[in-house]
C-alpha cells in the first residue's frame, strides 16, 4: 500500500530555510509526521529561490531525492546530488536525469527484484 502524500513546509528566516515540518492529511485534519529534517533543510538551502513551485520526488530504491522547480512560466527543471553525478546548484533536464537513473534502477531490480516480491528490503 502506498503511503499518503505529505507536504514539507520549510520554515524560513531572512529568505533561508531554517528547518522543515512534514504534515500529512488524516481523517480529521492534518498531522505533523516529521520535524527538523536536517538533510532536506540543507538541500533546500542550496536550491535557487526562483521557482513558483517546488516538488520533492523520492526514489526509495535508489535512495534519491530530486527537487523539481517550476517557474511561473516554463518547464520544470530538476536538481539532485545523486551519487555526486549532479549538483543541487545546477539544473538537470528530465532526459539527462532519466538516462542516469535508468541503469541504476534496472540494476536494483535485477539484484533485489525477486526478494522484493517476498519481503520488504531496506538498502
Image (spheres, grey):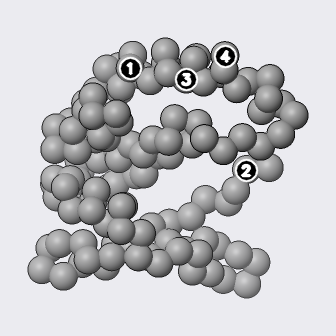
Residue 38 is labelled as: none
Residue 32 pos. (x, y %): 57, 80
Instruction: Categorize mark 4 by other alpha carbons within 10 Å: few (<14), some (14-19), many (20+).
Output: few
Given residues 108 and 53, the one toward you in this image is 108
- Pick whichever of labels 2 and 1 is earlier in the sequence: 2
Left/right placement of residue 9 relative to residue 45 reads right
The part of the image, by quadrant, that contains residue 106 is top right
Contact check, label 1 and label 3, Cβ < 8 Å: no
| Residue that carries the numbered disc 4 in the rendered image | 110
| Residue that carries the numbered disc 1 in the rendered image | 100
Contact check, label 4 and label 3, Cβ < 8 Å: no
The part of the image, by quadrant, that contains residue 60 is top right
Q: Nearer the viewer, mark 4 or mark 2?
A: 4
Residue 20 pos. (x, y %): 38, 73
Q: Report the residue at 21% width, 38% height from top.
A: 87
Instruction: Categorize mark 1 by other alpha carbons within 10 Å: few (<14), some (14-19), many (20+).
Output: some
Q: CA distance from mark 4 to mark 3?
A: 9 Å
Contact check, label 4 and label 2, Cβ < 8 Å: no
Q: Nearer the viewer, mark 1 or mark 4?
A: 4
Left/right placement of residue 111 relative to residue 50 reads right
Given residues 32 and 55, the one toward you in this image is 32
| Residue that carries the numbered disc 2 in the rendered image | 2
- Pick whichever of labels 1 and 3 is earlier in the sequence: 1
Q: CA distance from mark 1 to mark 3?
A: 9 Å
Instruction: Categorize mark 2 by other alpha carbons within 10 Å: few (<14), some (14-19), many (20+).
Output: few
Question: Tag 1's secondary structure?
Answer: helix
- Pick whichever of labels 2 and 3 is earlier in the sequence: 2
| Residue that carries the numbered disc 3 in the rendered image | 105
Q: Nearer the viewer, mark 2 or mark 3?
A: 3
Amino acid at each position: 500500500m502506498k503511503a499518503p502524500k505529505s507536504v514539507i513546509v520549510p520554515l524560513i528566516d531572512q529568505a533561508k530555510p531554517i528547518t522543515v515540518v512534514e504534515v500529512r492529511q488524516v481523517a480529521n485534519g492534518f498531522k505533523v509526521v516529521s520535524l527538523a529534517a536536517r538533510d532536506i533543510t540543507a538541500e533546500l538551502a542550496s536550491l535557487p529561490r526562483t521557482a513558483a513551485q517546488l516538488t520533492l520526488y523520492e526514489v526509495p530504491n535508489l535512495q534519491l531525492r530530486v527537487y523539481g522547480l517550476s517557474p511561473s512560466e516554463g518547464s520544470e527543471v530538476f536538481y539532485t546530488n545523486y551519487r555526486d553525478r549532479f549538483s543541487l546548484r545546477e539544473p538537470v533536464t528530465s532526459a539527462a536525469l532519466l538516462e542516469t537513473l535508468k541503469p541504476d534502477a534496472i540494476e536494483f531490480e535485477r539484484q533485489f527484484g525477486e526478494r522484493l516480491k517476498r519481503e520488504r528490503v531496506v538498502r
